[in-house]
Structures are given as structure tokens and as C-alpha cells.
Image (tube, helix red, strand yellow):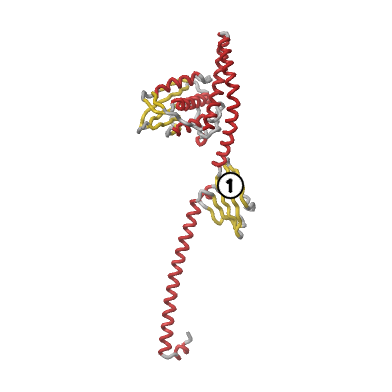
Amino acid sequence: MNENILKSLDSDEKEVLKEGLKSLIEQSYVIEEEYKKLNKSYLSLSKMISDIIDVLPAILWVINSKKEKVLQNYQASKNEDLLKQIDINKIGSYELEYNAKFYAVKNTKHDEFFIILLTDISDEKRNERLASMGSVAAHLAHEIRNPIGSISLLASTLFSRSELKNKHIVLEIQKAIARVERIVNSTLLFTKGVHINKEKFKLKDLKEECELVIASYNFNANINFDFDFLDIEINADKNLLALVLQNLIYNSIDSIEEDDLDEAFVSIKSFVKDEFLYVKVFDNGAKIKDKKAVFEAFKTTKLKGNGLGLSLSKEIINAHSGELGFETEPKNFYFTLPLS
């Protein structure tokens, strides 16, 4: 303030000016405190939004017109190669397939920014494909069942009428027919869903089932089989557990033949731990190639089978409130069943 104007004021006017300045300073402090609170709230809100963006299961990018990343969340930082597959000028919603995965893409433009959101829909696509394949498989299984039944009947008649030197040929035909019947029955069971009928029986009774399984399977490898079942009573669906063991044994035999071993073995061990029954099927065949797809239906790396055995076995064990899994060292597939 001009010094001459200040000197021209009387004492009352100076007092009024002093109070005015004091009030102005106090108001400045209040405004400063409000600004600090507002800035703190803004930072807190900004962090919360950032945290929400980061925990989104979807992939999010915000890109400017120069294709520079302005913002990305954690999922986006792990999938930067995907951004190269996006045409940012393609506005709207569409699907993208990349590295055997499917994504739903939504691209919107806001001023000079592009907001790109990707959602992994691989599971939904896989379920759609499985449903479609299951429907086709069920239809084919029904169509195949009748002619296979007729062929099986004719093969039995042929066996009884064949000369001794030709009977082994008919036996091989019957084994091939039995294999087709197993595939048909497994397919129908998979498509209809698993329903268990529990009964009490001796676990060691399954040893005879396993021996019958080996006798009916066609393989050339020299394999030493050793089955050790506990002498205990369990309450489960005997027929379905026999089917699980059948699938695990066939899986072991196929892996042994794939590795072309001179000395091979398949052994089954059973034991009880923490109120659970454990049954493990060991073999020294080829290692598991794709661990993530082991139990995926219709997906197999073997020359034999249709990729349903392990998937169906998992459903059966799940229906018993147990677990079906595998270990790599030593290599084995196992299942557990609750004893209580």
C-alpha cells in the first residue's frame, strides 16, 4: 500500500484496515487447508481408481493418437505383445485370437485417446467347442453302437466256428471291437454326465478288474504289471472306479509304447493317509508333454484314444468328492477318496 495513503488514515481507519488484513490472512489459511484436504481426497481417489484398474481381470490400455501408452493396468503390462495385434482405429467390439487364446476386444475413443479393453474368453470358447463336440460325439456314439453290437455278435459266432489256428485272429478282432465299445460307452457317459451308485465292496476286488483290463487291451510292449490293493472295505461306485483304473492303466501302457522301452512296468499302490484312500498308478513310460491339457476333453497327444479317458476319470472322482491328479517324480497318476 502507498505509504502516503497509510499516513493519511486516522486511528479508526487504521484499525479497520488492520482487522480487514487479519481477516484476509485467516481466510487465506482456511482456503489453504481446504485445498490440502481437497488435494488429499483427489490423490486418495486417484490411487483408488488406479488400484481398481490394476486388479481388473481384463487388460486395459489408454493410448494417445501417436500410439503412445498413457495408462495400462497390471494385466496389460504382462501382455504387451497383444497390443501389437490391436488396430486402434478399429472402433467397437470384436473378437481376437492370439497364441491359442481368444479375447473380446472393446475399443472406444475419447477426445484424442483410445481406451482398449480386452477380456480373455478362452474358457467360454472352449466350453462352446466342447459342447458342440460332445453333441456330435454323442450322436456318432449312438449311430456306432448298433453296428458294433452286430459285429461283436458275428465275431463270437466266427470264433466258435473257426479252426484253432485261426482263433487268435478272431481274438484280435474281438479286442478291437471291445476298444471301440469302450470309446462309445465313455463318450456316452461323458455327454450324459456322471451319476454314481455307491455300494460297499473290498478294494482288493479291483485287482481282478485290472487284470481283465490288461487281457482285453491290444499292446506289444513287454510290461511287468504289479497291483497292490489294500484289504479294506470302501463305499463307492465299483464299476466307475474300475473304469478310472482302466483309463489310467491304458494311459500308462500307451506312454510306454510311445517310448519304446525294453523293460517297462506299470504298478498300482494304495495306502490310507489322513482319512483318505490314495491309489497311485506308476509307470516308466514317456513323460507328460502338456501338463495344462492333461484333463482337457478331446485333447490328446497319443495315437490311441479320443482324449476322453482322463477327463471322464476326473469327473468320476470329483463325483466321489475325491481328487484326480498326477506327479512327475516319480511319474504317476493318482486319485483320492474320502473314507469318512
Above or below residue 288? Residue 74 is below
Residue, x 62% and y 52% (percent of image)? 92
- Whole-percent x, y for residue 186 in the image: 53, 28
Q: Residues within 10 Å of mark 1 (few under 14, many from 20)?
A: some
The residue singled out by tag 1 in the image is 104
Q: Is residue 259 left or right of residue 87?
A: left
The number of callouts visible is 1
Residue, x 40% and y 31% (percent of image)? 337
Residue, x 43% and y 77% (percent of image)? 25
Q: Is residue 95 left or right of residue 289?
A: right
Residue 182 visible from this viewpoint: yes
Residue sitting nearer the eye, 126 or 86: 126
Task: Say which element carries label 1.
Answer: strand
Amino acid carrying mark 1 in the image: Ala
Q: Residue furthest left?
A: 274
Residue, x 45% and y 64% (percent of image)? 40
Residue 68 visible from this viewpoint: no
- Whole-percent x, y for residue 155 in the image: 58, 15
Q: Residue furthest right?
A: 89
- Whole-percent x, y for residue 313 in the image: 48, 30
Above or below residue 38? Residue 197 is above
Above or below residue 311? Residue 168 is above
Residue sitting nearer the eye, 50 or 288: 50
- Whole-percent x, y for residue 100 in the image: 58, 40
Q: Quadrant of the C terminus?
A: top left
Which quarter of the picture shows residue 110? bottom right
